[in-house]
Amino acid sequence: MTTKTKRDKKDEQILERMRDLAQAVIDIFGEKGNPAVQIPLRSLSNSVFDEESRFIRMGDKLQERVFFHQGQAKRFMQTFLVASACKELLDVRKTTSIRDLFYMTKHTLARGENTFDDQSESDPVLEDLEVTIGALREELHLFASNKGTMVGNLTLIDSGDTIDCRSMGTGGYGIPSIVEEHVVQFKKCEADFVLIMEKDAVWRRLNEDKFWKKHNCIMMQSGGQTSRGVRRMLRRLHEEKGLPVYVLVDNDPWGFYIYSVLKYGSINLAFESERMAIPKARFLGLSSFDREKFDLPSVVTIALNKNDEKRAREIMKYPWFNEKRWQKELQKMMDSKVKLELEALSSRGISFISEKYLPEKIKNDDYLE
Amino acid sequence: MTTKTKRDKKDEQILERMRDLAQAVIDIFGEKGNPAVQIPLRSLSNSVFDEESRFIRMGDKLQERVFFHQGQAKRFMQTFLVASACKELLDVRKTTSIRDLFYMTKHTLARGENTFDDQSESDPVLEDLEVTIGALREELHLFASNKGTMVGNLTLIDSGDTIDCRSMGTGGYGIPSIVEEHVVQFKKCEADFVLIMEKDAVWRRLNEDKFWKKHNCIMMQSGGQTSRGVRRMLRRLHEEKGLPVYVLVDNDPWGFYIYSVLKYGSINLAFESERMAIPKARFLGLSSFDREKFDLPSVVTIALNKNDEKRAREIMKYPWFNEKRWQKELQKMMDSKVKLELEALSSRGISFISEKYLPEKIKNDDYLE
């Protein structure tokens, strides 16, 4: 089976890198030296906005983790403990959650100390491992939570099962958290674009109105901040199938942030941007200008609170929003002092969003990039 | 089409009840009287645990909502405003979210006052309407959020699309929030039971291990507290297909509460129990006795905090947990002073839960009811 071979090959590469890492340490022990691991630094000071590729990238600063060192010995041990658990997952060809990984690696050492006390200790160690061997956690067989659903003009294969996203009823296909090629393969895709929205209720409205059929697209919802699985699915559809990605979020700083992460990645996880970011993702709405454009009554607006204003000011300073059109968009929100939810469009009619708002926005190329 | 006819028939019944409600008011206006609506009281004082049917039921106390009354006139207007929006949904055969309903009915009246200021005002009015005309919100064409996924030995029809839950890949079928017969019909079901778990990560583990295939069942996950759609889906499978329902939750007061709501309903929504509750739902685990039974290391336990202890004491007083076996179960948690997550089973091995824990529990009928 092609699928299996591909998976094995990828797994073999990762295992090889882990073995190299371990062998280097063993070699130094053999020479009675003090082994050290070079770990790329995951911090604000080591993340840069790459103007050319237009996403947040991890810089090349490294930190050293040394074995014979009072302050680093425990973390050193933890790094290899996590690596060993991942190796086990790869060996037995199983996947699991990072919560599970924590339990798999948590135990009490001889002198009564625990390997990990809390998951907040094992998560950063996992991130260290990811950057050190240059593999996403999904490639280490670890999944985040399943989140999001999908319908549209696409047939895919998920672990050998054929999923026709054109006939998934009202529920849709649950987007898995691992959508790498060894799990999910695209079979037949006629769609012209992907529409990703933050809100499940909006997705249901559009699905009921068969928006994806009329406008030949794929529709996803992420239930708030987009999960890793949704981001990778979008990225793959964008890259492999050449589909433009339209983003539909609430008109508030949180909505802008969801879009921002999708497009440029985040500072915390800068090392993943290369595999996750979609620099050409299009912000379709809600724009602060839509209120007038689509004649929405002022009763459906919500006043910005102090926290919203603070967040909006922060977002305005992001280098990737440092463009005239974006500054105008954000300034408009600050000036109007209000925000808007996607549901506010329903004040103009139940299907206003699917029959008027979206078709006009898409037809007029009324988006920000 | 049978589906459409069934739907139309149900809708027609609801519309009839709404018209009756409105006509009664109009009649009294015609007689220059003061119209009043009798609304069943939704409160702790009007909910009882019915020993015979074994779920929480709404009592028969009524409150009167009067039109010519300074304190009630606004609420009276709101009741009919919400009813009118629901009528519109039924008329055009569309469904929407309760957030959308809020926006559909929010507008500014002549004297500058808003019909609703906040969704916290429209939600209880909707609940009033549900109990007054004796219809679930799903029957008024309103949906809650889509939550939960499903796989297993079941084929169903969702809005005309055939969904084979045996070949849904790693993602599964997204359980819609409206699963009433006019949307979802069961086609072919060979499963012997349903296993519902609170955690998506556990569901993924079991799906990867094809637990549902080996043990001929249907597996659902609800991502925390079970949604209305999941509860109705479980209830329908239990009632129409005669399947026992096994519940798998964390060993903590929150897990017990999830089970409790599934089984007996909740006080807030006592009027829905008749359509939602599954009095014979079986609590499979995690039990406080499982720690010793399955030899789980003490390092994976988590100390109960003050809030947990308070919650556990409250739960012990629920009349439906007032049975020797349940009191023993809850007392064991209080005595041991610890709680356990489902993931803690992974300390015994990645697939310990699917290969040892669950098969033994089910085989030995080791559950509480």
Image: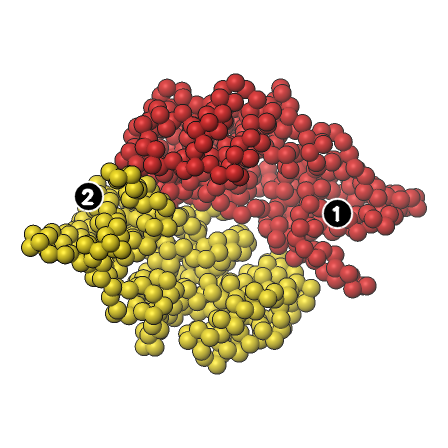
Chain colours: A yellow, B red
Query: Which chain hosts label 2?
Result: A
Q: Nearer the viewer, residue A168 or B53?
A: B53
Check disc 2: other Cα within 10 Å, few if <14, some if 14-19, many if 20+.
few
Q: Position of residue A224 (x, y in %)?
A: 48, 56
Amino acid type indicated by mark 2: Asp
Do marks 1 and 2 both belong to one polypeptide chain?
no
Q: Is residue A94 left or right of residue B269?
A: left
Check disc 1: other Cα within 10 Å, few if <14, some if 14-19, many if 20+.
many
Q: Residue at x 69, y 34 (%)?
A: B44
Q: Is residue A48 left or right of residue A26?
A: right
**CA separation in Å, label 1 and label 2:** 61 Å
Q: Residue at x 46, y 36 (%)?
A: B304
Residue that carries the numbered disc 2 in the rendered image: A91
Q: Residue at x 72, y 60 (%)?
A: B107
Residue that carries the numbered disc 1 in the rendered image: B79
Q: Is residue B146 left or right of residue B97?
A: left
Q: Residue at x 73, y 42 (%)?
A: B18
Amino acid type indicated by mark 1: Thr
* Residue A272 in view here: yes
- Secondary structure found at label 1: helix
Labels in figure, total: 2
Q: Nearer the viewer, residue B82 or B127?
A: B127
